[in-house]
Image: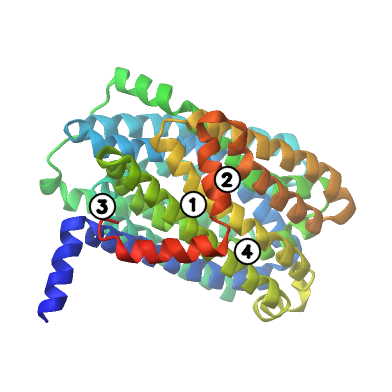
Amino acid sequence: MGGFMKSFSVLKKTGLYSFMSNTSWIVFESIIRAIVGLTVGVFIARYLGPENLGKLSYSSAIVGMFGVLAGLGMDSNIVRDLVKEKDRVGEKIGTTFFLKLSGSLIAVVCCISSVFILRSNDVTVVSITIILAMSMFFLPFDVVSLYFQSIVKSKYTVLAKSFSCVLSAILRIILIFNDAPLISFAWVGLAEAMLSAVALTYFFLLKRNQVGFSWTYKFETAKKILAEGWPLLLSTAGAALYMRADLVMLGQLSSNHSVGIYTAMLRISEIWYFLPAAFISSLQPFLVRAREISRDLYIFRLRVLYEFMILLSVSVSIFISLFSDYLVQIVYGHQYQEAALVLRTHTWATIAVFLGVASSQYLVIENLQKISFYRTAIGLLANIVMNALFIPIWGAFGAAFATVISFYIATFSLILFESSRGQCFIIIRSILPLNIINFIRGAKNDANF
């Protein structure tokens, strides 16, 4: 018992306890969302079939591409500032809320304009896109989750988002059992965004006595946020484009059926993408503090992070490659069987995605957001060109192949820039199995991590 209490005391002193506690909440929410999303997504895919699923996914892709405007794409910067400038938290949050609300209006206009240009002859797709676009007006309330993240209290965000996720999942199941039309699922998407905003507001008001500040707007702060964050905003916008460009280009160059097949594959391939975001969202404050304490400690933590991302992503990719046929057959049934080959190809993008998310934190902390934009632009350009070449020939498989190659090009384009070249070499060395073993041992033996 004494040994346990001593270990607990060490964890509290080093800050690892709060990191682990906060991470466990984020991982819990991510796992719940992934399990619920996959389970309900499977029911929806089986119910709608590839054609209708393709229509719903096409509309969701358009909204996803412009959704970054509503979210500003600067969340990492905002969390960093909230950690560093505790005396200006109310000003930062209030100003960010106003900026996000302005971005939401722009995003909605862009979504509606785009769908009329691309699919004006498809009334169903246009209607679904407009309904889903309205959900972006609730995204500004996510500033509450940024505040909870900055004080390492993400459990309130987890409770709010899990509540909305589970409730909306129940609504979708009810729609399936009642043979609801396709457009009904778009209305549930809007309801989920509203429920999340209401729940976040509730927890913030519940803790208002502990908060000790009020939201304020300051024009100079808004200018500073935009001036510092526009490279990251453009980078995030580019990332959203090339995470969704394949679906939109499939819809334009192939068919709704191909979009449905590709979407079914993505639900399995991308279900693991929450893992790096879950760990890194809690780790960011510790990386910021480590940089202030010691450059060696800072680099050490980054290297351990890359090693862990490699180990995790390679394990996922091998597992999916070996069992893709069985997974697709069991999960979706015979009508989606052609998604297995697409899944076997797309899963190898996982390694590049995990390393890309991890290295993005380095760029944010070092104020190298311009490089984030440049490498995303490089990946986006490669993705669009290869999609245009391969989709007309191979359909969904061509889109998967183009996406995998473009992700690696984007992640390792860090080597093109002098200020990030050293990090790229560290990432490359992380691939070596011996390094993985050594850094795992080092992480276990280093109490300061």
- Quadrant of residue 130 within the rendered picture: top right
Q: Residues within 10 Å of mark 4 (few under 14, many from 20)?
A: many
First of labels 2, 1 by sequence position? 2
Image x and y of residue 346, in percent: 69, 60
Residue at mark 3 to residue at mark 4: CA–CA distance? 29 Å
Q: Taking 361 as reference, is 199 left or right?
A: left
From this view, report whether residue 257 is shown above or below residue 98: below
From this view, report whether residue 81 is shown above or below residue 188: above
The residue pinned by badge 4 equals 269
Q: Nearer the viewer, mark 4 or mark 1?
A: 4
Is residue 388 at least partly visible in the picture?
yes
Q: Nearer the viewer, mark 2 or mark 1?
A: 2
In depth, the one of 122 and 137 nearer the eye is: 137
Is residue 274 at least partly visible in the picture?
no
**Is label 2 in contact with label 1 (beta carbons under 8 Å)?**
no
The residue drawn where x is 73% and y is 34% is 117
Residue at mark 3 to residue at mark 1: CA–CA distance? 29 Å
First of labels 4, 2 by sequence position? 2
The amino acid on which the numbered mark 2 sits, given as a three-letter code, is Gly
The residue pinned by badge 1 equals 190
Disc 4 on helix, strand or loop?
helix
The residue pinned by badge 3 equals 152
Image x and y of residue 52, in percent: 71, 61
Q: Which mark is residue 64?
A: 2
First of labels 4, 1 by sequence position? 1
Q: Nearer the viewer, mark 3 or mark 2?
A: 3
- What's the colour scheme? rainbow
In depth, the one of 395 and 110 nearer the eye is: 395
Residue at mark 2 to residue at mark 1: CA–CA distance? 13 Å
Residue at mark 4 to residue at mark 1: CA–CA distance? 25 Å
First of labels 3, 2 by sequence position? 2
